[in-house]
Image (cartoon, helix red, strand yellow):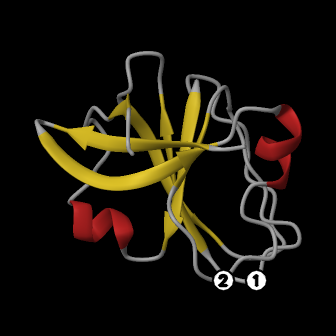
């Protein structure tokens, strides 16, 4: 089962998200989904969109939660590993612009949504 979490940056809540616990859940990710909550993959350095039906936005975070790279990933693609990354946020197109999320920002994953 995925764990509900908050994504917070500079004291403001960006979004509610899901964080899968198992390797199998992380590997499945957003495959086959069209509408979805953001997904936080930890640990993670690279993602793919094989089997996905929509383009997604991907933010790679380092060990301190700092965004080190952002990309858009179209369906049926394999992204290059981002070696500094320790976690990844996958979101729908337009989310990062709406959140005003940029490289260099720090994102905290907070637990406790109920």
Q: x, y (%) of residue 3?
A: 57, 40
Q: Nearer the viewer, residue 58 or 17?
A: 17
Inter-mark Cα distance, 1 to 2: 6 Å
Say whether disc 1 or disc 2 marks the residue closer to the N-terminus. Answer: 2
Q: Nearer the viewer, residue 38 or 95?
A: 38
Rendered position, 50 above or below 1: below
Rendered position, 21 above or below 69: above
Residue occupying the far top of the picture: 63
Label 1 sits on a secondary structure element that is loop
Rendered position, 84 above or below 12: above
Camera-nearest label, 1 or 2: 2
Residue occupying the far left of the picture: 11
Q: Are marks 1 and 2 in contact (CB under 8 Å)?
A: yes
Q: x, y (%) of residue 18?
A: 55, 49
Q: x, y (%) of residue 71?
A: 52, 58
Q: Nearer the viewer, residue 110 or 93?
A: 110
Which mark is on residue 34?
2
Q: Residue at x 32, y 35 (%)?
A: 107
Kindly indicate the quadrant of the structure image that contains residue 68. top left
Q: Residue at x 57, y 71 (%)?
A: 36
Horizontal placement of 89 versus 78: left or right? left
Which mark is on residue 53?
1
């Amino acid at each position: 089962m995925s764990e509900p979490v908050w994504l917070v940056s500079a004291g403001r809540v960006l979004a509610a998200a899901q964080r899968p616990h198992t390797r199998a859940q992380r590997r499945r990710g957003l495959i086959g989904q069209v509408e979805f909550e953001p997904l936080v993959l930890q640990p993670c350095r690279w993602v793919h969109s094989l089997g996905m039906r929509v383009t997604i936005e991907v933010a790679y975070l380092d060990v301190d939660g700092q965004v080190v790279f952002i990309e858009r990933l179209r369906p049926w693609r394999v992204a290059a590993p981002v070696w500094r990354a320790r976690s990844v946020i996958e979101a729908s197109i337009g989310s990062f612009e709406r959140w005003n999320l940029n490289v260099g920002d720090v994102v905290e994953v907070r637990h406790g949504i109920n």
